[in-house]
């Protein structure tokens, strides 16, 4: 726990935060543009060239809007909920290796040996923010949104956790950097565990409350679901939390299944003083992550919403047995191979 | 009448392969020409008989056609038109028209552009024209008075020309003023 380690960790934390916040703002912008293009219209194109400064306008709007607290809410929880919703999204990014090394520093904030366990623990905390928001708002629609969301997120966490087990059986280690090392040696894990990937992908849509699993904020059914009563900065925190969750889920998928920062011919970790290579690795990671973000946005504007009972049915009666069978199949195969 | 629901095939019931079909559809739309019109750089063409803002008209000779019968004021559903009728003086300032309004105000914020005033006017004096975007900086500014309405209304090519014929008849009958 020497000073150099603390200093560089702080630098990495600040760096990741400073990178993710604009990415959130521009992913909102990307969502609006991509959704518009899919719907045969042009998105925002008035602020700045091609509308690229729109996030600035959004940010200013959120800062200047009236922050209204209705009289009937439970004040303490009302103020606490957005913070609780946003924090876990950022915490999960602490274990993801977003590059190889720059200089002597590994490009991961916390190279935990139980990386994935930490991630799933923190993801479970994400439920609390939404439930608290629904409860604190003291009104019908947010209440329903919060309840539905808690049920949905809990159901799909199970499927998600079980789906990823074959990946770690193949790799033999929970450390995410070792997962990437395995993939650089053996090829991407999506080729070895495609069913795991599919279940994990669908469960991440459910975990981040994205369409088609949009129940908690179903815009046409529940007014705005759990964030109905929130305005201005608190709503901005929920919004940012949702997109940060998406970024975090994309990063996790890239790390576990698509090789993280490696490309098939470009997977040697950067040597000690090769700044360029390190930066290039980070670029590869970010590019893959952006591809997944586009997939998130694309699927949102394509699919209709699941009905609540269909959603729960899918989580418990289809994904859970399927994931268990998946684990069993891989266990048998590994045993036979040994 | 019973609507037959098609049975889903095996692949359709799996749900995931049909996702690819959906992705293809959205991708196709992504690359199509967009239908957005960049207003105000591009404006749409106003169709004929469009019900825009109501304005008062003068005929070819310059007569104000409104004779202050107040039918439009009475028929207007939101009561946007306010007319001050003239006293015994007649109030008209043009030609041999016997009567004209002293004041004629249309509150453009109240107007619902229904066209009843144009439909009910016996003199073809008020028409709904092509203006659709009216702006002002205060509520007072959006109450258009008679001068503004006449200025915006312009000239109406009157085919009936009732006052001209009346003047000629009066001349024939020898009762011209």
Image (cartoon, rainbow, N blue to C red):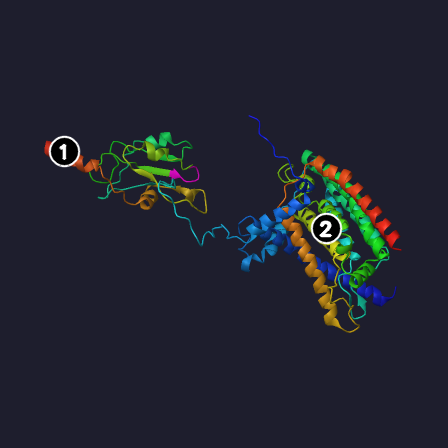
Quarter-wise, where is residue A93 in the image?
A: bottom right
Start-end of magenta stretch: B106-111
Q: Residues within 10 Å of mark 1 (few under 14, many from 20)?
A: few
Q: Position of residue A183 (x, y in %)?
A: 79, 60
Quarter-wise, where is residue B93 in the image?
A: top left
Q: Residue at x 61, y 56 (%)?
A: A56
Label 2 residue SS: helix
Residue A229 appears in the rendering: no
Say left or right for A228 vs B65: right
- Residue named by callout 2: A245
In this rendering, the count of numbered labels is: 2
Q: Position of residue B97 (x, y in %)?
A: 22, 36
Name, please, the residue furthest toward the top. Answer: B1
The label nearer to you, 2 versus 1, is 2
Say left or right for B74 vs B23: left
Q: Is residue B109 magenta?
A: yes
- Residue named by callout 1: B169
Q: Nearer the viewer, residue A219 or A204?
A: A204
Q: Position of residue A220 (x, y in %)?
A: 62, 38
* The disc label shown at residue A49, or none: none
Label 1 residue SS: helix
Q: Nearer the viewer, residue B46 or A185?
A: A185
Q: Is residue A207 magenta?
A: no
Instruction: Chain letter for mark 2, please.
Output: A
Magenta: main secondary structure: loop
Q: Residues within 10 Å of mark 2 (few under 14, many from 20)?
A: many
């Amino acid at each position: 726990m020497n000073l150099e380690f603390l200093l560089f960790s702080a630098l990495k934390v600040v760096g990741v935060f400073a990178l993710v916040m604009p990415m959130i703002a521009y992913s909102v912008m990307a969502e609006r543009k991509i959704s518009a293009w899919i719907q045969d219209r042009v998105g925002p194109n008035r602020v700045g060239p091609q509308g690229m400064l729109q996030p600035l306008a959004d940010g200013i709007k959120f800062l200047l809007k009236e922050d209204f607290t209705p009289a009937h809410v439970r004040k303490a929880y009302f103020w606490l909920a957005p913070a609780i919703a946003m924090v876990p999204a950022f915490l999960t990014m602490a274990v993801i290796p977003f590059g190889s090394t720059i200089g002597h520093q590994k490009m991961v904030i916390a190279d935990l040996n139980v990386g994935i366990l930490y991630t799933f623990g923190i993801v479970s905390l994400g439920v609390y923010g939404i439930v608290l928001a629904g409860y604190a708002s003291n009104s019908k629609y947010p209440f329903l949104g919060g309840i539905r969301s808690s049920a949905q997120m809990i159901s799909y966490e199970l499927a998600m956790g079980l789906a990823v087990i074959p990946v770690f059986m193949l790799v033999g280690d929970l450390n995410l950097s070792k997962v990437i090392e395995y993939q650089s040696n053996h090829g991407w894990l999506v080729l070895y565990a495609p069913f795991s990937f599919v279940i994990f992908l669908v469960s991440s849509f459910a975990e981040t409350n994205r369409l088609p699993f949009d129940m908690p904020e179903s815009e046409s059914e529940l007014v705005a679901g759990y964030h109905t009563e929130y305005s201005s900065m608190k709503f901005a925190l929920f919004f940012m939390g949702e997109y940060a969750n998406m970024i975090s889920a994309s990063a996790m998928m890239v790390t576990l299944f698509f090789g993280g920062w490696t490309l098939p011919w470009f997977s040697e970790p950067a040597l000690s003083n090769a700044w360029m290579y390190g930066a290039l690795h980070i670029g590869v990671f970010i590019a893959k992550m952006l591809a997944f973000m586009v997939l998130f946005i694309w699927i949102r504007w394509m699919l209709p919403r699941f009905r609540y009972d269909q959603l729960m049915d899918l989580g418990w009666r289809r994904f859970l047995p399927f994931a268990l069978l998946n684990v069993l199949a891989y266990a048998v195969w590994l045993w036979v191979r040994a | 009448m019973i609507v037959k629901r098609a049975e889903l095939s095996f692949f359709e019931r799996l749900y995931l392969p049909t996702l690819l079909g959906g992705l293809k559809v959205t991708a196709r739309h992504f690359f199509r020409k967009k239908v957005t019109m960049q207003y105000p750089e591009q404006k749409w063409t106003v169709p004929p008989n469009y019900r825009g803002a109501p304005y008062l008209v003068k005929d070819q000779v310059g007569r104000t056609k409104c004779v202050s019968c107040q039918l439009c004021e009475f028929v207007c559903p939101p009561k946007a038109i306010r007319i001050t009728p003239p006293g015994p003086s007649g109030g008209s300032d043009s030609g041999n028209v016997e009567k004209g309004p002293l004041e004629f105000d249309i509150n453009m914020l109240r107007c619902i552009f229904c066209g009843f005033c144009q439909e009910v006017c016996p003199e073809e004096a008020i028409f709904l024209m092509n203006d659709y975007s009216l702006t002002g900086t205060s509520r007072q500014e959006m109450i258009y008075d008679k001068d503004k309405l006449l200025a915006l209304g312009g000239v109406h090519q009157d085919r009936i020309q009732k006052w001209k014929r009346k003047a000629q008849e009066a001349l024939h009958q020898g009762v011209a003023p």
